[in-house]
Amino acid sequence: MPPRTLAPIILLEAANLASGVGNAIVMLTIPWLVLEETGSAASAGLVAAVSALPALAAAPVAGWLVDRFGRRVVSVVSDILSAIAVASIPIAAMLGDLTFPVILALAVLGATFDPSGYTARRALLPDVAEAAQRPVDPLNGIHEGVFAVGWTVGPVAGAALIAAVGAERSFWAPFALFLVAGACVAAMRVGDAGQRARAQAAAGADAGAADAGWSGLVRGFTSLWDDRVLRAVTVAVLVIAAVYLPTESVLLPTYFERLGDPTSLGLVISALAAGSMVGAFGYGWLSARLRTSVLARLILLGVALSILPMALLPPLPVMATAGFFLGLSWGPANPLMNTFVQRRIQPDEQGRVYGVQMSAFYAAPPLAMLLVGAAVERFGLEAAYLGLAAVLVVVSLVPALAPRTRELDG
């Protein structure tokens, strides 16, 4: 048996951190850039919504690519393509062509590659745990926590870059970070449980049938849908995300852009990410001590109770504190989903299941972002934020109080 080593974990999480910081900078900077160009919250919501549309198709294909060609290969290629996409924005600015339609087109291009890298790194977790001879459940929490660290550091870095060099040139930072992420994954020396399972399946009478044509692409959906517990967890997190994410992408940028205060925007989003980081890192400890149904209820109730103070647009310290608790409640959700996929789905299908989940998460939140942006234009920021908070409270409390939540313990 090879000796225990931390090298695979360090390399994966270095890539995870670099990608998280890069994506957080992009997430903050694109709405700010759009608002500078147009002054319209609806336009910022439109970019957030439209740029996510390609991922609806790309995410399931990304999952198939992960299962078909290998987790490391897809991760590295995706990071390189993401780097090229974000570099296109400052290049277009230097050429004098950075209009709103160009921003929209380049945001769409960059979003096309994001699901592949994210899916591949998630799928690598069991391989990294095996190579490092560590349990995978705590690593699920560490992985999502490190990604949250990136989203904690990224908004502050993004705000500082906007203030120092302007929104356009800020995109050179994520360009470099995506290249770092690709290099770290390329340097890893781990196996691939998905490829091993695929090779074993290829030795059977129906060799290759699971990957052939349309059936291979939809396999992730059928595997997810046929597992009632995994389906329930995915739907619950999806519904909350569809209402939660417009806070970061539309409402807070609009509020602080009107105040001309990018630093406070970075601090509040960092508080959200910091809470998420703590919640994710704590997942391993929580999952060892609480029933799954209890943990799920804590997530739902915490989200519902934390959004209300933020919706009142209080002073910065109160808003940042509420944001921290909102992130803290949300933090264990993704590690919980990872654990269910790893335990209930075959290794050569996990990439596709992750891809279907990613596609669902790209489908619902953008529609909410578009509606929220339009609501801000029509009813005002304060009314739109209160309405969103009310919806989030309802969709969190209903499943939290449902008796069937106990089925998660099965």
Image (cartoon, grey):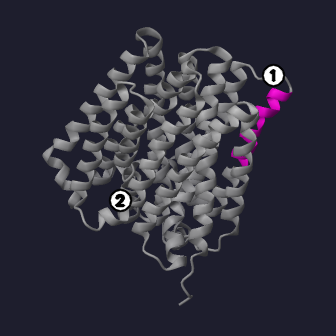
- Could you tell me residue 303's position as x and y percent? 31, 40
Count residues near mark 2 (Cα–Cα under 10 Å), then give few for <14, some for 14-19, many for 20+. Answer: some
Q: Position of residue 245 (x, y in %)?
A: 44, 34
Task: Based on the picture, tell me whether residue 71 belongs to the magenta stretch.
Answer: no
Q: Check disc 2 and report the residue beneath it.
A: 340
Q: Secondary structure at mark 1?
A: loop
Residue 217's disc is none
Q: Quick check: 301 above or below 245?
A: below
Q: Residue 84 is drawn in which quadrant?
A: top right
Q: Is residue 343 above or below residue 377?
A: below
- The quadrant the C terminus occupies is bottom left
Residue type at numbered disc 2:
Phe
Magenta range is: 80-94
Would residue 84 be counted in the magenta stretch?
yes
What crowding class fits label 1: few (fewer than 14 Cα within 10 Å), some (14-19), or many (20 or more)?
some
- Quadrant of residue 315 within the rendered picture: top left
Relative horizontal placement of residue 187, taking residue 354 as reference (left or right): right
- Quadrant of the rendered image containing residue 401: top left
Residue at the spot 19% in from the left edge and 49% down from the top edge: 405
Question: As rendered, which of 281 and 353 lies closer to the eye?
Answer: 281
Farthest right residue in view: 95
Residue 154 appears left or right of 283: right
Q: Is residue 51 above or below residue 290?
A: above
Q: Amino acid at mark 1?
A: Asp
Reading the image, the residue beneath label 1 is 97
